[in-house]
Image (cartoon, rainbow, N blue to C red):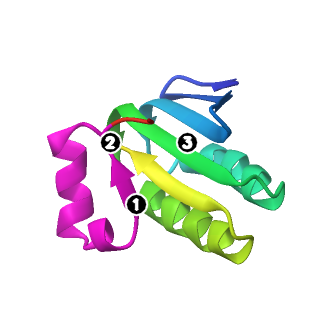
């Protein structure tokens, strides 16, 4: 688990999926920590990786860059990668940037 003033990042296994749960703000200060977690999992040859963004209150372009980079790494290692987003506000960011056509996005983990 990683905790700082802006973000909390935890990992768990749920039904064969490695789940990274992010809470708080993902910005230029906290994005590198998220990148580290995601790269470790992609390099670890997990079959399925999900990033739960349901408790994220803010994300900036550096966060989007980390997620795109993780998607690339996962594709290279044949790891299924998806985002869990239930906030219309966050989903709008992915729609505006065209990333809804790039990522698999679900509202729930199941």
Please state which of residues 40 and 61 is positioned toward the viewer in this rendering: 40
Q: Is residue 82 above or below residue 101?
A: above
Q: At 35% from the left edge and 32% from the top edge, which residue is drawn? A: 54
- Going from N to C along the chain, the mark reached first, 2 or 1, is 2
Left or right: residue 56 compared with residue 49: left
The quarter of the image holding the N terminus is top right
Does residue 51 sit above or below 62 in this rendering? above
Q: Nearer the viewer, mark 1 or mark 3?
A: 1
- For residue 55, side relative to residue 47 (left or right): left
Label 3 crowd (10 A; few <14 / some 14-19 / many >=20):
many
Dot 1: element: strand
What residue is rendered at 40% in x and 60% in y?
104
Quarter of the C terminus within the rendering: top left
**Pointer 2: residues within 10 angstroms few (<14), some, or many (20+)?**
many
Q: Is residue 92 above or below residue 77?
A: above
Q: Which mark is residue 75?
A: none
Nearer the camera: disc 2 or disc 3: 2
Q: Position of residue 98 (x, y in %)?
A: 25, 73
Pointer 1 residue: 104
Q: Which mark is residue 85?
A: 2
Q: Tell whether 45 sits left or right of 27.
A: right
Residue interval drawn in magenta: 85-107
Q: Earlier in the sequence, mark 2 or mark 3?
A: 3
Which is in the foreground here, disc 2 or disc 1? Answer: 1
Q: Can residue 83 be spotted in the picture?
A: yes
Query: On the image, numbered disc 3 is attached to which residue?
Result: 30
Secondary element type, mark 3: loop
């Amino acid at each position: 688990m990683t905790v700082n003033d802006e973000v909390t990042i935890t990992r768990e296994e749920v039904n064969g999926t490695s789940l990274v749960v992010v809470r708080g703000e993902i910005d230029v200060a906290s994005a590198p920590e998220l990148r580290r977690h995601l790269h470790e999992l992609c390099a670890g040859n997990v079959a399925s990786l999900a990033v739960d963004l349901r408790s994220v209150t803010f994300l900036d372009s550096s966060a989007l860059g980390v997620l795109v980079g993780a998607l690339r790494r996962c594709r290279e290692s044949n790891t299924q990668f998806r985002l869990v987003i239930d906030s219309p506000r966050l989903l709008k960011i992915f729609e505006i940037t065209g990333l809804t056509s790039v990522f698999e996005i679900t509202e729930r983990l199941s």
